[in-house]
Amino acid sequence: MVKQATLQSNKVSTVEDAKFALDNCHCNVQNKVIASVGRGQVEPSIEPSKITVPTSIYLNLEDLKCFEAVERQYEQWGVIFHNSLAIQPSNPAFPTNSGQTVLMGAPKSGFLEASFLRPVNWVSAFVTSSQRLVLSAYDRDRQLLAQTVLPGSNLANSDSTIPPNTLLSVTVNNISSVTFCTFNGQFTLDDFRFCL
């Protein structure tokens, strides 16, 4: 069972026994795309700007190099990151959910932002954090649309009741950007997905 925390509007979320189907991503997905890093070598088989049916985009982080600053590598898929670094965690407190590569907020610790070239209606990632973490969704005018909260630390091999790699998601129309924020802490993201 996947653990998930979800908050829409002004409701308070919990991570207790929430069920979540990644394949439908709350937007009646008809297509799923695994998005590889755009390094100018290969054009995507599906052009994101021409997608007309709900589509889930799953970012393949394994194409990134360890300690690579991540910004425009997935721009062809409609997302640009800010303050993001690809790492292969050596600290066992931050395990990966799948593969070996995750994203972390850096150089400014505790913060990571993803901006979408076209509005999306669902964003998710598996998170492991040393502190309480807030996932916030904004519209193009930077108005807060929704938030999801990981209420506390969920490091592996700790006494936390929240398991590492807890799924956080936001579901609301017209998401132009999301931020992952923790005060005075570190976190990692894995399996970043969004729906067009």
Image: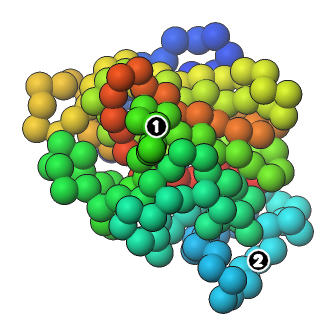
Query: Could one spot residue 23 in this view of the protein?
Result: no
Q: Can you tell which quarter of the image residue 70 is in?
A: bottom right
Colour logic: rainbow
Q: Nearest the camera: 68 or 175?
A: 68
Please name the amino acid that badge 1 sits on. Lys
Q: CA distance from mark 2 to mark 1?
A: 34 Å
Task: Please state, as top left, top right, bottom left or bottom right, where the N terminus lies in the image.
Answer: top left
Residue 162, given in percent of the width and then of the height, sits at: 26, 28
Report whether 70 appears left or right of 105. right
Residue under the point 35% across and 23% down:
184
Which residue is farthest bottom? 41
Q: Nearest the camera: 152 or 15?
A: 152
Please name the amino acid that badge 2 sits on. Ile
| Classed neighbour count for the residue bearing mark 2: other residues with Cα under 10 Å, few (<14), some (14–19), many (≥20) | few
Report whether 16 appears left or right of 112. left
Q: Tag on residue 190?
A: none
Residue 95, given in percent of the width and then of the height, sits at: 24, 51
* Callout 2 secondary element: loop
Residue under the point 11% across and 25% down:
159
Residue under the point 32% across and 54% down:
97
Report whether 20 appears left or right of 141. left
Residue 48, given in percent of the width and then of the height, sits at: 79, 67
Residue beneath label 1, please? 108
Q: Are marks 2 and 1 in contact (CB under 8 Å)?
A: no
Query: Could one spot residue 190 in this view of the protein?
Result: yes
| Classed neighbour count for the residue bearing mark 1: other residues with Cα under 10 Å, few (<14), some (14–19), many (≥20) | few
2 or 1: tag closer to the N-terminus:
2
Residue 171, given in percent of the width and then of the height, sits at: 66, 34
Residue beneath label 2, please? 46
